Image (cartoon, grey):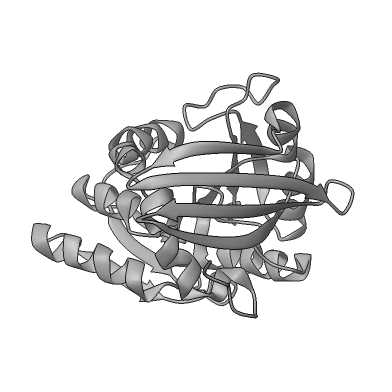
Amino acid sequence: MTEQTHGAWHEQDGFWQTFEPTIFDTERRALAPEEVDQIIELLALAPGQRICDLCCGVGRHSLELARRGFQVTAVDRTERYLDQARTASEAEDLPVEFTQDDMRDFCQPDTFDVILNLFTSFGYFETQRDEQRTLENAFRSLRQGGRFVLELMSKEIIARIFGARDWRPVEGGFLLEERKIVDAWSRIENTWTLIRDGKQQQWTFSHRLYSATELGGLLETCGFRDVTAYGSLTGAPYDEKAERLVIVAGKQAG
């Protein structure tokens, strides 16, 4: 069995390499055009606007936004993912700006009309101060009137659908996902065991859990206003049927 090394899981390239085919499988990649359609409609975006894809991964949304005529900056800490996205953009001659950076540190003041943080790419850090720092930098990076979009699994949704363990087939093998709620519902601890090509690899990692109210309050603490929660990127209500927590928060025009 492959053992993970010491240190924060989200800073270990081995995690992102091991689970890349699982996180960004063929089905997930194929959803990008539909999800970008939904984002454009939800925010009433117009081509030419400047968009930051914060924690862009392999660039599936960044590339699709560039195809629609947006000015895109794609940010991620994982060089392997950025290299893939850059190669794909060059193959299509798409003008995407790629930046390798930690989302806690990335800041380009008064630059973007929209910042996107999608696919539960928030809540990784041990301290909430680090998460607040991420939001503060996002606020500074937006132009007046700009908007920040967070899309993730919330505390309410996880409580509704929670299962302690399940198996699922993945490309080339099987994945066992085990979950445990810890620290009075403030975090979820996950252990993923990947069995592929006769080998077993296991990693344990955790996320901070936010309710819509908690995350909305944190955004307001960081200066955002007009904070609205939706149940999906389609703009569905955030209610008992919500599929995801989507929060749109604005930087008010001065």
- Left/right placement of residue 237 relative to residue 222 reads left
The correct choice, above or below, for 92 with respect to 167 in the image is below
Residue 18, quarter of the rendered image: bottom left
Give the x, y percent position of residue 139.
59, 62
- Left/right placement of residue 80 relative to residue 116 reads left
Residue drawn at x 18%, y 61% is 89
Residue drawn at x 61%, y 56% is 122
Give the x, y percent position of residue 157.
69, 32
Residue 7, quarter of the rendered image: bottom right
Q: Nearer the viewer, residue 189 or 38?
A: 189
Residue drawn at x 23%, y 68% is 86
Q: Nearer the viewer, residue 4 or 229?
A: 4
Q: Is residue 6 visible to the viewer in this orientation of the structure? A: yes
Please give the count of numbered marks on the rendered protein. Answer: 0
Give the x, y percent position of residue 189.
72, 54
Residue furthest toward the front? 198
Q: Is residue 251 visible to the viewer in this orientation of the structure? A: no
Tell me the quadrant of the picture where the C terminus can be found: bottom right
Give the x, y percent position of residue 58.
33, 59
- Left/right placement of residue 46 relative to residue 208 reads left
Residue furthest toward the bottom? 6
The correct choice, above or below, for 229 with respect to 144 in the image is above
Residue furthest toward the top? 241
Q: Nearer the viewer, residue 234 or 162?
A: 162
